[in-house]
Image: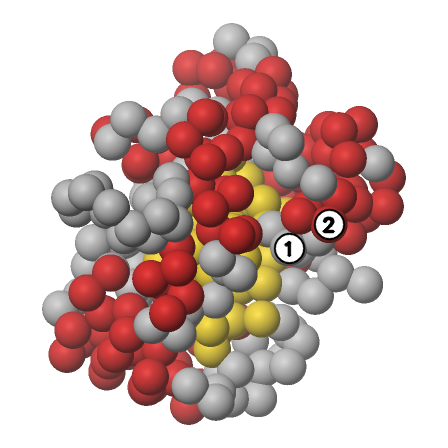
Amino acid sequence: MRKPVIAGNWKMYKLLSDAVETSLELKRLVANANHCEVVIAPVFTALKTIADRVEGSNIKVAAQDCSIQNDFGAHTGEVAPVMIKDVGCSHVIVGHSERRQFYGETDESVNWKTMAGLAAGLTPIVCVGEKLEEREAGNAESVVKTQLEGGLKGLTVSDLERIIIAYEPVWAIGTGKTATPEQAQEMHGFIRGVVAETHGAEAAEGLRILYGGSVKPDNIVELMAQEDVDGALVGGASLDAASFAKIVNYKQ
Ligand code: PGA
């Protein structure tokens, strides 16, 4: 069975002291959560400290982005996946819509980052999702399909076992406007179908697909009740330990 993943994307929030405080509080609040994997994604400068502080607990740490390659070299400002792994992280978010919208991320760079992340032994959380105008024009599925095919290009079936997909409709991110559980299920089922075509039914069946976009304590239960929703990528509601813990503990 697919073990659910609840991941918190802290974006560019929290100075180190705040990040440490939140992660220590979270560690206490989710100590008994064995029904899912818990991941938090602080900014780069906090990764090592947070990874050290949560070591041995059930919280894993993700970077929010990475370089397209692991070879050391003259790449000012870049951080290689091997460096992220080196400081104790296990996951990396790739292709978040904010990076696609504002920082030039393309399906091709998402593909490179995913491969580099895998090569470093990280679990890439590959984000896809359509914009409002794309949904309104009836193109949501074709946009997501293109992102998936581009992002996962060249990946083997065993690579697929080591990645996580996050479906995040752009119109639902930070807007308070969540996709309905039906809308989420519809797209998650579609994504699983696309992966079945590209990588076979077994790979698709094992793939974990997270929903992201205004997930909160009061909508997590109905989202998780959907057959193809295997977890959540949470932004705003993950910044507060108590609120994120409620989402993690949706089952209790
Ligand atoms: P949100 O962000 O939960 O604040 O909508 C989700 C995300 O961007 O991953």
Q: Residue at x 28, y 74 (%)?
A: 48
**CB of mark 1 within 8 Å of CB of mark 2?**
yes
User: For mark 2, what is the residue?
Assistant: 158
Q: Residue 193's spot in the image, x, y percent? A: 77, 31
Q: Does residue 119 show up?
A: yes
Q: Residue at x 64, y 55 (%)?
A: 162
Q: Which label was assigned to residue 162?
A: 1
Q: Residue at x 83, y 36 (%)?
A: 200
> Is residue 104 rendered to the left or right of residue 218?
left
**Spatial CA span between label 1 and label 2:** 7 Å
Disc 2 packing (10 Å; few <14; some 14–19; many ≥20): few
> Is residue 55 rendered to the left or right of residue 141?
left
Q: Residue 14's spot in the image, x, y percent? A: 18, 66
Instruction: Say which of 74 and 198 sits in front.
Output: 74
Q: Which label was assigned to residue 84?
A: none
> Is residue 84 rendered to the left or right of residue 4?
left
247 lies above or below 25: above
Outermost residue to the right? 201
Q: Amino acid at mark 2?
A: Ser
Q: Residue at x 32, y 86 (%)?
A: 53
